[in-house]
Amino acid sequence: MPTLTVTETDLIAACVRGEHRAQRQLYDQLAGLMLTVCRRYLKRREDAEEALLLGFAKMFRALPNYRFEGSFEGWVRRIMVNEALMQLRQRETLTVSFEDFAQPENLATTAATADTQLQAEDLLALLSTLPAGYRTVFNLYALEGYGHQEIAELLGISEGTSKSQLSKARAMLQRRVQFAAISTN
């Protein structure tokens, strides 16, 4: 029996009609990637899973309004990021005090070297150790591609604060990458 290929457009249309198999297929296709997105913002897996489920519920409710402009995956990702941010605001403070980055161990003192070899999993683990505000701005800017103005609007902070937190996040990550590289040698 031949296998039918379902296009993304057909799958979305079937989901809008309320077809449960199509909804399950769409969920199965996107859940792993979107859980990874949520995990970048939320430290605990349980919190990320909750954001994922709430995000999918919102996505399915909003699906009739999807205009097929741009990437569907990007549209879903934006919903998941927004849901993860909502969960993050409930669980952690996004502001960073001066004391958080005034500690010598939180400042980069030397440039990262090209021979630093860390796996993506290791980098994500280091990223999860950043204070919530740093981690959130870094994720939005470096991994999701948002600009500082968009980040400021999403988080209710100034554009300057976004730039500052990104700079401090990079410095802290650089220092931790160097420390991790030294520890593995």
Image (spheres, grey):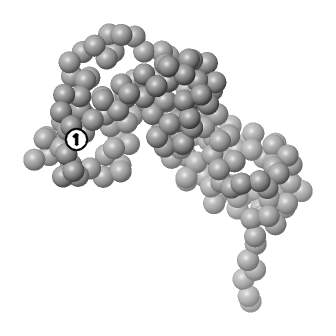
Question: Is residue 15 something one can see in this rendering?
Answer: yes
Q: Residue furthest left?
A: 185
Question: Is residue 48 something one can see in this rendering?
Answer: no
Location of residue 2 (image quadrant): bottom right
Seen from the viewer's position, the closer of residues 158 and 95 is 158
In the picture provided, is 126 more to the left or to the right than 182?
right
User: Where 104 sits versus 32, above or below?
Assistant: above
Residue 75 appears at what percent x and percent y?
A: 69, 47
In the picture, the quarter occupied by the N terminus is: bottom right
User: Where 151 sits versus 55, above or below?
Assistant: above
Look at 21% across and 50% down and name the residue there: 114
User: Where 12 sits versus 129, above or below?
Assistant: below
Look at 51% across and 46% down and name the residue there: 36
Q: Amino acid at mark 1?
A: Ala
Location of residue 113 (image quadrant): top left
User: Where 39 sits versus 24, above or below?
Assistant: above
In the picture provided, is 110 more to the left or to the right than 12?
left
In the picture provided, is 179 more to the left or to the right than 85?
left
Q: Residue furthest right?
A: 17
Location of residue 61 (image quadrant): top right
Residue 85 appears at what percent x and percent y?
A: 59, 29
Q: What residue sits right under mark 1 in the picture?
A: 112
Categorize mark 1 by other alpha carbons within 10 Å: few (<14), some (14-19), many (20+): some
Residue 135 appears at what percent x and percent y?
A: 44, 30
Look at 30% across and 28% down and name the residue there: 172
Q: Circle 1 sits in a helix, a strand or a loop, which is it?
A: loop
Residue 163 appears at what percent x and percent y?
A: 46, 25
